[in-house]
Image (cartoon, coloured by chain):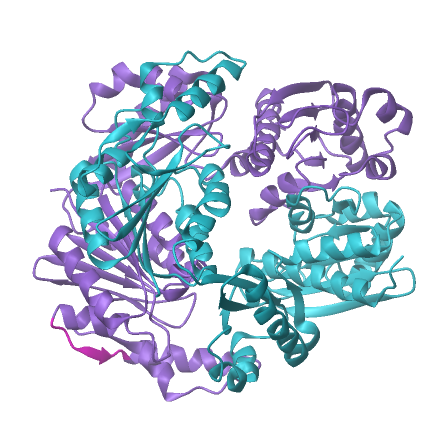
Chain colours: A purple, B cyan
């Protein structure tokens, strides 16, 4: 059978725009991986009447309700009370969660005094499955009532995301006899419609596994989803499809089962035992930031320079002022010099560089917004590519950084293992 | 009178978790500035039946409906058709929008051929107010029917956000005789509950303007909202409150009417005509990235180094290996040396440095996750502060970067204007 889920996020701060609904995104992505359809996301404030109406509406149109937020210790945290009232459940104290909360407060250095209210966080719906929270105070829970599955999770994404991945996804998988697994093939350098047209004839014939392309920021993904009795069986169905997609699309496929280009590059750096550094002008540190978003990058990604100004290009990389004057900061020559210099300066295997116009508008030399030169230097070559990334500062910076990392990836693919 | 608004975002890619609902966030923030309450966000797929139900439900409980997404040229873009059907409106061709779309396609270098479908984007509800789209193809629109106000906007945030700010907010303001304006006071270094308790007695007495504190990532904001007959009148009500909050909270107030700490720092750099650079270890380029998110930063933010590894600290900043061996990379001494070195290396007025443990887990020398040293060097002083930022790699990096910029801000506040 196939389930329909609905995600209800509770919190007035979402309705005020103070925070963004991250929970709905990663929960939906996880549900897509499980082959569970989502028809609605709803955000509602900390208001009993409107929350009740939202839960009633969701149970009328979905099989699985996932409710996040409003599990805190204060009087306006009423999610559990409302959900339990809707399904005729009592709230009961979970002694293990209570003990965990007491221990958490004891550990705090600043000795925040614990109040009776904190024990409210240890209350759970009677007869539920409890999801232990290793990232915060309030446990999550799940129960089945009137043929509906109800999951309750804490709101803060840094608690909600690991709990959803490690506790709720296995729980949801166990609901059906057939298990659903999926893997994502990531593509950079080919548009969504081109990917679709190449895979189209193959896709329409398939029922299990299935292929579904979708677009990210400047990149495209293909999700391969299989239904089977076990993970092994599912993976056996998925593996040949991964190969098919790789064969069909060629080297625009940058990774399988990785979260991002930076993760793909870091993996390759580890496999090849190579080191990398970046010299960034218009991306202003974004490559370095993204490479170091991943824990454990430090040996492989040695560092970088943000040479936003001409003075910095001279002082940090030793790029001669005359060269900058003659060719301009946004030029083939400068991109090449930056990649070579950062590679030598940091003694790494691969140096990447980005110099261009992030906008808004053209630069003082008339180079248009979106024009970017990207360089990659290795022991035996330097390459520069020119791209025109259109408009929008954030978009230009994001795609320029991805493109630079993709060029590093291609250089790494060509290298021998150490 | 006070309005209630509902934000409906249309798009299957939102329900799959491929993209996050950015539109709902900035629209809600804008509505909060206008004093318009939001009770629900809803996300629904490109499905006529479910979209119709969502619009019908919204009109039953809100005064203003803001619908984003599904205005593209393809067959699954049906938002306008559905909304118009709900309110008994016809769609008519807007000649100006059609001409703009033709011109847009002509301008494209790669000569994507234009199809009949593209003209669908120029169709608008009869008798509506048209919001010209200077950031993309599909125009936005607004109409009033059965006492409800309906606003339709394109989905991509880089079109939707500027259109909402520059076209829809003035439109919504004109709906009521009294205009609502607000300003945000931003605070770093004091918790939300402390801010609330300091302002509490003053807040409860107020009716116009009103004060409302709320929490961001590692920071707190106070929104001051005034209702008046004109912007001037509103600002006259708001100005003394800004002064009150500044007086009451002191130097934890880092800016008024700025979007972020980086913007506050850049403003001060401009006012004081000073330059800045950053040496980043655990923040890995995040300070540089955030400073250069803002256009026009290059003269003031000269650049930085990402010295994630000890080798990079030595090669880029000349920090002696012996010093790193003796005191450790995560230490007072190293933070100080980094700030001083990056300041000298780039010849700037202020050098900031960050070195710490972003996690997960402690570093190889047993320094706990979240322990961060932050340095600021100026012509006549070097300061280092130690902070313990708790757990979570992203949180630690974000707050460490904010704290470093806050220390730069405080150093700038102490400097004389040039």
For residue B153, above or below residue A350: below
Q: Is residue A251 left or right of residue B66?
A: right
**Residue B408 percent across, percent down from the top left:** 76, 61
Q: Nearer the viewer, residue B392 or A190?
A: A190
For residue A329, above or below residue A106: above
Q: Is residue A39 left or right of residue A306?
A: left
| Residue B159 in view in this figure | yes
Residue range highlighted in magenta? A88-94
Q: Residue at x 24, y 55 (%)?
A: A171
Among the 4 quarters of the image, the one containing residue B117: top left
**Residue A155 percent across, percent down from the top left:** 37, 63
Q: Is residue A89 magenta?
A: yes
| Residue B360 in view in this figure | no
- For the N terminus of chain B, the quadrant is bottom left
Q: Residue at x 50, y 67 (%)?
A: B225
Q: Is residue A139 magenta?
A: no
Among the 4 quarters of the image, the one containing residue B239: bottom right
């Amino acid at each position: 059978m196939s389930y329909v889920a609905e995600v209800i996020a509770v919190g007035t701060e979402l309705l005020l725009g103070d925070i963004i609904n991250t929970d709905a995104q990663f929960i939906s992505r996880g549900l897509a991986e499980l082959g569970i359809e989502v028809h609605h996301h709803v955000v509602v404030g900390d208001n009993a009447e409107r929350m009740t109406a939202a839960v009633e509406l969701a149970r009328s149109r979905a099989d699985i309700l996932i409710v996040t937020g409003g599990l805190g210790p204060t009087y306006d945290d009423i999610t559990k009370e409302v959900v339990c009232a809707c399904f005729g459940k009592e709230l009961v104290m979970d002694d293990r969660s209570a003990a965990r909360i007491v221990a958490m407060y004891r550990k705090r250095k600043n000795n925040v005094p614990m109040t009776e209210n904190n024990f409210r966080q240890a209350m759970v719906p009677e007869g539920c499955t409890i999801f232990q929270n290793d990232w915060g105070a309030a446990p999550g829970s799940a129960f089945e009532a009137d043929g509906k599955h109800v999951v309750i999770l804490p709101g803060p994404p840094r608690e909600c995301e690991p709990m959803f991945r490690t506790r709720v996804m296995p729980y949801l998988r166990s609901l059906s006899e057939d298990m659903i697994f999926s893997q994502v093939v990531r593509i950079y350098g080919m548009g969504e419609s081109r990917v679709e047209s190449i895979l189209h004839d193959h896709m329409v014939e398939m029922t299990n596994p299935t292929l579904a392309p979708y677009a990210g920021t400047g990149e495209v993904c293909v999700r391969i989803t299989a239904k089977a009795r076990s993970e092994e069986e599912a993976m056996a169905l998925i593996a040949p499809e991964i190969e098919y997609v790789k064969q069909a699309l060629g080297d625009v496929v940058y990774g399988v089962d990785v979260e991002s280009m930076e993760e793909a590059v870091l993996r390759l750096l580890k496999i090849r035992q190579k080191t990398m550094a970046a010299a960034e002008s218009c991306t202003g540190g974004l490559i370095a930031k993204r490479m170091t978003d991943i824990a454990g990058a430090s040996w492989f990604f040695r560092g970088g320079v943000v040479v936003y100004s001409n003075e910095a290009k001279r002082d940090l990389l030793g790029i001669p002022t005359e060269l900058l004057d003659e060719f301009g900061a946004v030029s083939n020559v400068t991109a090449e010099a930056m990649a070579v210099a950062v590679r030598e300066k940091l003694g790494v295997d691969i140096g990447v560089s980005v110099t261009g116009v992030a906008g808004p508008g053209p630069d003082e030399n008339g180079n248009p917004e979106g024009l970017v030169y990207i360089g990659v230097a290795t022991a035996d070559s330097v390459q520069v590519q020119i791209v025109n990334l259109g408009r929008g500062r954030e978009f230009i910076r994001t795609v320029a950084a991805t493109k630079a990392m993709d060029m590093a990836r291609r250089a790494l693919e060509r290298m021998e293992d150490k």
